[in-house]
Image (tube, rainbow, N blue to C red):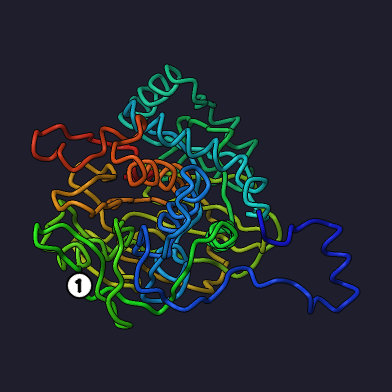
């Protein structure tokens, strides 16, 4: 890697010069008229795709085009959860592979992504959900992924600030824990992939909005129109997250997606009080504590389609009510920030990683809760772009499944669903 390596020695060396000698993490080169591959979207999946194109396939003449700033979309508006407790065979294998990539990602990128495998506990409060989670655990066991039952007493030992009133609205009857689950710093993931891709020749062009697609006589996509002029490419890959439907429509493609607002919020910083991720699917919320001490809290999506990027009070109220029922002590905590983001998800709640019917155009989208899948999503999308054939882990995720009714109905996509 051509970049200056980060280490305790480089930190000490640069401290002597008051940290004025550090190299830029990534360049801001002029936009060239043509590339081998254009990746639309500088979020987690777009950055990871470009990085793995360069690292795994030697394709370095790549431009990442982003209408805003790097990592400023949904990448900057998520709750950073990383887990693989899904129910479908393909989902378990795919997300467990992503978790394995996360476990070595800091070393791979030479960047501190602040990855903390603090475990996730799913607290169960109804017997139907208990049966559902037991079924999920048995499926995961078939693939060697960890997901173990724990008793109410063990849950309270691990999370002692839980409501200890047996007369609470929905008593705790048990739970499941994935010990390898965790969190990572979301902007560190974006910056690490950006730095790693730049070191291998990838160019990042911020504030460059795609306004259309260039087509040849046969209808194949041969580039994009931008607010900075046309840019040609042999292949164009869309990784536009919540804007996937809009960007694809510029090429005349209607994707099987629904867009909804998902909101989250953080508290004022507190001393360490929750050292695991806690998910309450029956109550409809999840909570963890960041390294800065903030409680990171989220719930389900808005019930109707929306491109909002702000919270909706009714949904916020439901989440807070459920949170305080399980953690009464949190009623004294003050809210610090509250936000929302537009999520595109497919009709079967599984992602889409596919070539389109237009030669030269590829799409990755439908990442409802896509932060956990960034490494595997970029890894497999880069494979598809480079080789024009799906990676074995992602072969069921093509868009053709909707034409042949091969749905991958994934109830584990959102932990509170």
Q: Quadrant of the C terminus?
A: top left
In this rendered view, identify the residue nearer to me: 329 or 218: 218
| Depicted 80 relative to depicted 137: above or below | below
Identify the residue at the far bottom of this view.
Answer: 228
Name which quarter of the figure residue 4 lies in: bottom right
Image label count: 1
Residue 90, percent across and down? 33, 29
- Look at 54% across and 26% down and name the residue there: 151
Q: Quarter of the image holding residue 213?
A: bottom left
Place of residue 228 in the rendered image (x, y in percent of width and height, measured from the top left): 33, 83
Mark 1: few/some/many CA within 10 Å (<14, 14-19, 20+): some
* 302 w.r.t. 163: above or below: below
Residue 5 in view here: yes
| Residue 324 visible | no
For the residue pair 355 and 18, the one nearer the viewer reads as: 355
Closer to the camera in the image, 17 or 128:
17
The residue closer to the viewer here, 279 or 394, is 394
Residue at screen point 51% across, 76% down = 29
Residue 185 in the image: state x and y as whole percent.
58, 58
Task: Look at the numbered disc 1 and give the secondary structure of its residue.
Answer: strand
Give the vertical position of 298 relative to 168 (above or below). below
Furthest residue toward top: 142
What residue is rendered at 19% in x and 68% in y?
214
Q: Which residue occupies 37% across, 26% down?
A: 136
Specify the quadrant of the image occupied by residue 312.
bottom left
**Mark 1 lies on residue:** 212
Where is residue 354 drawn, in percent x and y? 25, 45
- Whether residue 190 sits left or right of residue 352 in the image: it is right
């Amino acid at each position: 890697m051509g970049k200056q390596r980060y280490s305790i020695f480089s930190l000490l060396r640069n401290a002597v010069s008051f940290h004025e000698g550090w190299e830029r993490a990534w360049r801001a080169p002029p936009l060239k008229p043509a590339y081998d591959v254009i990746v639309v979207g500088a979020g987690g999946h777009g950055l990871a795709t470009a990085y793995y194109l360069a690292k795994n396939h030697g394709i370095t003449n790549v431009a990442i085009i982003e209408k805003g700033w790097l990592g400023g979309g949904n990448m900057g508006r998520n709750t950073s959860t990383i887990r693989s407790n899904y129910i479908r065979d393909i989902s378990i294998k795919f997300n467990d592979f992503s978790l394995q990539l996360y476990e070595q990602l800091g070393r791979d990128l030479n960047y501190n992504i602040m990855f903390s495998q603090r475990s996730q506990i799913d607290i169960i409060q109804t017997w139907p959900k208990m049966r559902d989670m037991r079924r999920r655990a048995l499926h995961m066991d078939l693939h060697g992924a960890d997901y173990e039952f724990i008793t109410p007493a063990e849950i309270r030992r691990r999370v002692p600030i839980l409501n200890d009133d047996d007369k609470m609205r929905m008593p705790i009857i048990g739970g499941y824990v994935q010990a390898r689950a965790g969190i990572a710093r979301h902007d560190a993931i974006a910056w690490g992939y950006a730095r790693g891709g730049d070191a291998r020749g990838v160019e990042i062009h911020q504030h460059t909005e795609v306004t259309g697609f260039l087509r040849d006589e046969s209808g194949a996509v041969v580039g994009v129109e931008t607010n900075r002029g046309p840019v040609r490419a042999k292949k164009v890959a869309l990784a536009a997250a919540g804007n996937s439907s809009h960007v694809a429509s510029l090429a005349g493609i209607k994707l099987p997606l629904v867009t909804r607002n998902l909101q989250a919020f953080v508290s004022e910083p507190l001393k360490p009080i929750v050292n695991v991720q806690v998910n309450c699917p029956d109550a409809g919320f999840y909570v963890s504590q960041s390294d800065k001490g903030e409680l990171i809290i989220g719930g389900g999506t808005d019930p109707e389609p929306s491109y909002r990027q702000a919270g909706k009070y009714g949904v916020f109220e439901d989440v807070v009510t459920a949170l305080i029922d399980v953690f009464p002590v949190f009623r004294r905590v003050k809210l610090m920030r509250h936000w929302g983001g537009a999520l595109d998800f497919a009709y079967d709640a599984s992602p889409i990683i596919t070539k389109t019917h237009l030669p030269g155009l590829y799409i990755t989208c439908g990442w409802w809760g896509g932060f956990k899948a960034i490494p595997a999503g970029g890894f497999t999308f880069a494979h598809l772009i480079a080789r024009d054939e799906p990676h074995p882990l992602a072969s069921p995720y093509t868009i053709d499944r909707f034409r042949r009714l091969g749905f991958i109905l994934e109830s584990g996509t959102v932990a509170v669903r």
